[in-house]
Image: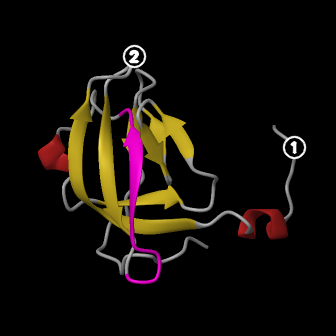
């Protein structure tokens, strides 16, 4: 097991729910990725992310899908894109990401607790 953290450490991580409103294929990277625009509601707004999801998702499967993302990491340069949030997922049997998604429609921007 990794190092234990305190509950106050956990509360520093802002994991929020958002809805994917657009997705475009980015073939300019070594591993093809999607550029996602995710709506996190009025207070947080629309954020961009780059996600290597091409093995398990088509653009149509992602549009309007609600997902979980960390919104308070520093921005990260990925190719020619500045990624503003980290989309969260678990690995499938081929070590390809499966998005974390609520099973009921939620208000965008809701925080994981």
Q: Report, in whole angstroms, how far the alpha carbon at label 1 lies from the one at label 2.
A: 32 Å
Locate the C terminus and report the quarter of the image it occupies: bottom right
Residue ID for mark 1? 3
Examine the structure image and report whether residue 9 is included in the region drawn in magenta.
no
Residue beneath disc 2: 30
Above or below, 59 against 85 in this view is above
Disc ID at residue 75: none
The mark that comes first in sequence, 1 or 2, is 1
Range of magenta residues = 42-52
In what element is the residue under mark 2? Answer: loop
Residue 8, horizontal then vertical, whole percent: 83, 70
Q: Going 43% across and 68% down the picture, which residue do you hit?
A: 17
Could you say which quadrant of the image residue 12 lies in?
bottom right
At x 40% / y 20%, what residue is drawn? 94
| Residue, far front | 80
Residue 40: x %, y % from top left: 40, 71
């Amino acid at each position: 097991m990794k190092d234990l953290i305190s509950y106050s450490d956990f509360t520093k991580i802002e994991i929020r729910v958002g809805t994917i409103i657009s997705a475009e294929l980015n073939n300019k990277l070594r591993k093809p990725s999607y550029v996602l625009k995710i709506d996190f509601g009025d207070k947080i707004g629309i954020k961009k992310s780059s996600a290597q999801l091409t093995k398990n998702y088509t653009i149509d499967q992602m549009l309007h899908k609600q997902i979980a993302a960390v919104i308070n990491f520093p921005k990260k340069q990925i190719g020619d894109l500045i990624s503003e949030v980290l989309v969260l997922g678990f690995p499938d049997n081929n070590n390809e990401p499966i998005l974390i998604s609520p099973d009921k429609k939620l208000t965008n921007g809701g925080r994981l607790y």
